[in-house]
Image: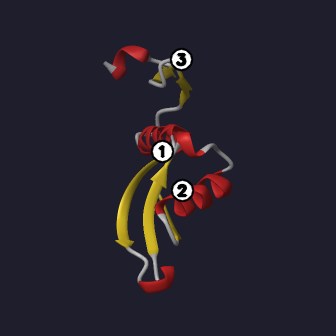
Amino acid sequence: MMRVEGKTLEEALQNAANEKKVEVEDLKYYIIEEKQAGLFGLGGKTIVEVYTLGDIQLFIEEYLQKYFDNLNMPVELFVTKNEDNSLKVVINAENNAILI
């Protein structure tokens, strides 16, 4: 996850989308802090933690690869995004039966 801030929630999300090179609609987020602007619109600040489906996909790939590396088991990993935005994980090993 990445922390981003802005004067408003919209600005914080736009900053995150720009940094991740995605559309705002692709972001999932948690509001960490939201401070309303005071008199004359000054002092507002919003901090959010954001992630995308791509971040989750990368996490799964790295986590599983590290897991199998620690077992000294060479595997081929494929993590793909389906049309319904679910993720499919395919693991191929020399002895697939041992994975079950």
Residue 34, percent from left and from top: 37, 70
**Residue type highlighted by circle 1:** Phe
Q: Check if mark 3's residue and mark 1's residue have beta carbons within 8 Å.
A: no
Q: Residue at x 49, y 79 (%)?
A: 41
Query: Looking at the image, is mark 3 or mark 1 earlier in the sequence?
Result: 1
Q: Which label was assigned to residue 13?
A: 2
Residue 19 position within the rendered picture, expressed as x and y whole percent measured from the top left: 66, 58
Q: Mark 3 — residue?
A: 83
Q: Residues within 10 Å of mark 2 (few under 14, many from 20)?
A: many
Callout in the foreground (3, 2): 2
What amino acid does circle 2 point to?
Leu
Q: Label 1: which residue? A: 59
- Mark 3: few/some/many CA within 10 Å (<14, 14-19, 20+): few
**Between marks 1 and 2 in the image, the one whose residue lies nearer the viewer:** 2
Mark 3 residue type: Glu
Judged from the image, the secondary structure of the residue bearing numbered disc 3 is loop
Task: Give the camera-side residue of 71 and 9.
Answer: 9
Residue 77 coordinates in the image, percent (x, y)? 54, 28
Instruction: Give how far across and how far down residue 13 sits, in percent.
Output: 54, 56
- Nearer the observer, disc 3 or disc 1? 3
